[in-house]
């Protein structure tokens, strides 16, 4: 049923930035084989083997969604849009990270579930009711007893992280009001195919969704997708609007158009993914060649953004300190550490992004505009960015 189409080799857990790179620590580093498959029954693209979520979503979780201005603004806009469209009295967020979405709501109006307890503590300390738990039937049942059902359930960059989708949607169904709406947004497989952004595959992205796949999967929990839109977030995401099967909500025009577009793109065919896999191998060759050519010319290359995505690239392309001197990142708890698998040092941009840098690989290519606007001095003095999507090039 699930056919493998892409093998990205031995990979570490992307969130496990190393404090030290002594032999003992390196020997203990966890690796798994990252390969991706296509299910020809429900059209879902997912990892062939997933990592135990307890190893990933720990009390040391590094990613802070509110680190980027782009994301803060995007969540603010989404919250406003959802309030205007659905006028919810009460809301639930699944996977609230550091509260970047719920902060746009009154404390009485929203509750959250977040398994990374270091993050849950942030929103708890700010007065938002947050359950430090994984989303499943057990927590849904506890929440139902205490808070009853919700008008709006929201989730961003979380549902695609959860291996058991049937349980996800059944749990949502347990706490969704009769005419309630479940809105969730995750990276879009259609954009991955279009942009050749194979770095969207990493341990946390257990699945990459299409409309045709999610429509089939939610149906098993007596739910239906009545609207969907493609967004620019994270280099191309899809936002689904889901309600009960017997809800009054009717399918929107843009939903019907998107379904047609996906069929035209071939998202229902294994062949589309096999062709993509060939383009990925080509991209690796080109990126490694470009970095090696620049190094031969004694250029200093760093990477901008210690992203999870760049862990996939560096490990798949076998790019280490011999090509990338270091990575700069604004996240305080990534600084002073080393990237997973390839052990490239991470430092703050204030220290590392100085006049000695000739080239910066955009590990955070999804924030290209924000970074280019911020780093005008670098560009003005002749510094250049390297990007690998949709093609490997210097920009
Ligand atoms: P993400 O793509 O997983 O959201 O991660 C983006 C990473 O890039 C995050 O660690 C923060 C970092 N970053 C910077 O260091 N500088 C920036 O200007 C931006 C936008 C992000």
Image (cartoon, rainbow, N blue to C red):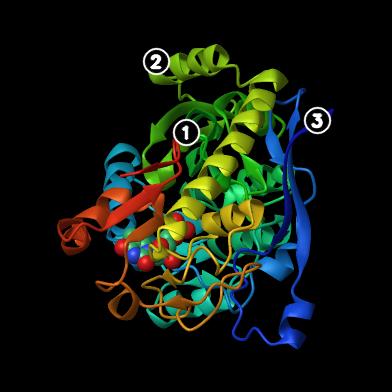
Which residue is located at x 59 percent, y 48 percent?
159
Which residue occupies the extreme right position in the image? 1
Circle 1 packing at 10 Å, graded few (<14), some (14-19), many (20+), is: some
SS at badge 2 = helix
Which residue is located at x 51 percent, y 74 percent?
120
Q: Quadrant of ligand 1?
A: bottom left
According to the image, label 3 marks what residue?
Answer: 3
Q: Is residue 215 above or below residue 188?
A: above
- Observer-side mark, 3 or 1, equals 1
State which tag comes first along the sequence, 3 or 1: 3
Task: State the quadrant of the C terminus.
Answer: top left
SS at badge 1 = helix
SS at badge 3 = strand
Name the image quarter holding residue 10: bottom right
According to the image, label 2 marks what residue?
Answer: 253
According to the image, label 1 marks what residue?
Answer: 195
Q: Is residue 264 above or below residue 192?
A: above
């Amino acid at each position: 049923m699930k056919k493998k189409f892409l093998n990205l080799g031995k990979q570490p857990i992307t969130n496990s930035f190393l404090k030290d790179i002594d032999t003992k620590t390196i020997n203990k580093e966890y690796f798994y084989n990252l390969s991706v498959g296509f299910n020809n029954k429900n059209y879902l693209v997912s990892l062939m083997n997933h990592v135990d979520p307890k190893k990933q979503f720990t009390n040391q979780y590094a990613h802070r969604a509110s680190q980027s201005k782009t994301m803060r603004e995007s969540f603010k806009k989404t919250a406003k849009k959802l309030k205007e469209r659905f006028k919810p009295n009460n809301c639930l967020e699944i996977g609230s990270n550091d509260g970047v979405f719920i902060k746009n709501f009154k404390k009485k109006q929203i509750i959250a579930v977040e398994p990374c307890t270091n993050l849950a503590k942030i929103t708890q300390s700010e007065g938002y009711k947050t359950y430090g738990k994984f989303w499943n039937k057990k927590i849904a049942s506890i929440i139902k007893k205490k808070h009853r059902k919700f008008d709006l359930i929201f989730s961003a960059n979380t549902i695609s992280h959860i291996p058991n989708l049937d349980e996800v949607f059944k749990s949502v169904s347990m706490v969704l009001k009769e005419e309630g709406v479940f809105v969730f947004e995750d990276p879009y497989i259609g954009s991955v195919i279009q942009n050749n952004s194979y770095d969207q595959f990493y341990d946390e992205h257990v699945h990459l969704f299409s409309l045709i796949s999610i429509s089939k999967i939610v149906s098993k929990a007596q739910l239906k997708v009545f609207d969907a839109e493609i967004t620019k977030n994270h280099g191309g995401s899809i936002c689904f609007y889901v309600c009960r099967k017997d809800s009054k909500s009717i399918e929107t025009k843009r939903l019907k158009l998107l379904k047609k577009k996906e069929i035209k793109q071939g998202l229902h065919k294994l062949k589309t993914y096999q062709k993509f896999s060939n383009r990925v191998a080509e991209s690796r060759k080109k990126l490694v060649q470009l970095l090696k050519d620049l190094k031969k010319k004694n250029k200093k290359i760093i990477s901008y953004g210690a992203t999870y995505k760049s862990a996939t690239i560096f490990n798949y392309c076998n790019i280490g300190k011999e090509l990338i001197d270091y990575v700069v990142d604004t996240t305080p708890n990534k600084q002073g550490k080393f990237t997973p698998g390839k052990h490239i040092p991470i430092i703050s941009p204030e220290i590392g992004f100085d006049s000695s840098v000739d080239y910066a690989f955009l590990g955070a290519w999804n924030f290209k505009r924000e970074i280019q606007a911020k780093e005008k001095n670098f560009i003005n003095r002749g510094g250049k960015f390297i990007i690998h999507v949709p093609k490997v090039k210097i920009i």
